[in-house]
Image (cartoon, grey):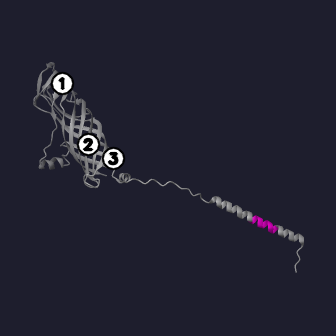
Amino acid sequence: MIFTPPALLRKSLFCAAGLVVAAATHAQTSSVVLAQAQPVATSLPAAPSKTAAQIDAENSKKWSVYWGWNRSNYSNSTIHFKGQDHDFTLHDVKATDLQTNTGLADIFKYYLNPAEMTIPQTNLRVAYQLNDDTAIALNLDHMKYVVTQDQSVAIDGQIQGVAQSGQQVIADNWLNFEHTDGLNIVSIELEKQKKVDWFGDDRARVFALVGVGVVIPKTNATMHMIGQSRNDEFHLAGWSAGVGAGLEVDMTKSVFLRSAYKMGYVDLPDVLTSARGDKASHHFTYNELLIAVGYRF
């Protein structure tokens, strides 16, 4: 039998009790730390679901380009001619557009021939779709403006120092004046669109547009009355503003047909009429009907 002295027994009991207390304290501290380390669950709001229109807009092709052809007509205008030896005004002058023939042979020769396709009255447009119903575009309306020959108009002013009054016949031996290469309106257009269920599957949309831009005609002017030969140069001559409306129909996801009616105002204060710097000025309104074929990408 082993005898343990009382003093030694007490020390052993105290040590054992200390170890038990230390272990319990460590376990409690570890539980607190683990409890604090647990991630706090948070509830985040769910992202709002996108509408069908928003999804279509994100998946749609943003850019488009079209090429087309137009007919146009013009209001009468008062044309003021001024140069080194003349300063006169023609009143209420009539003008027309200039159509390229549309026979079958002419269609293949001009309208569908890449080498000659700028000869007819044409339209070129590059657009970016801002959202599902709004687009912005850079637009070229290449129209042609020809003063009608053999018309009699009122005249006033002077030509080579000789006073002018009464009526004057605009004939080929007196004056040729036309913007035939052409009456070029380069504009920025803003367009609003609305889908219509006319052909099914959201293939069609109507639209309205407003535009403003500059006019850079290539004016063909021959002033026989003062012995000036034909002048034919591109020149920034003025500005234009207009509105329009029309219909666009998708043939495929990328190809579409488009028709539009436009009306606008043209102000040309700085038309170049001769190589020596003679000028003319006039303003008028126009109506334009166009049809075009386009491609989205």
Question: Residue 260 at what x, y percent from top left?
Answer: 23, 44
Instruction: Give the CA distance from mark 3 to mark 1.
Output: 47 Å
Q: Nearer the viewer, mark 1 or mark 2?
A: 2
Q: Residues within 10 Å of mark 1 (few under 14, many from 20)?
A: many
Residue topped by disc 1: 89
Q: Is residue 230 visible?
A: no
Residue at 74% over, 63% down: 25
247 shown above or below 231: below
Left or right: residue 41 compared with residue 168: right
287 shown above or below 281: below
Residue topped by disc 3: 133
Residue topped by disc 2: 245
* Amino acid type shown at disc 2: Ala
Q: Helix, strand, or loop for circle 3? A: loop
Check whether the beta carbons of the residues at disc 1 and disc 2 lie within 8 A of each other.
no
Q: Residues within 10 Å of mark 3 (few under 14, many from 20)?
A: some
Instruction: Give the CA distance from mark 1 to mark 2.
Output: 35 Å
Q: Residues within 10 Å of mark 2 (few under 14, many from 20)?
A: some
In magenta, the rendered stretch is 15-23
Question: Residue 1 at what x, y percent from top left?
Answer: 88, 81
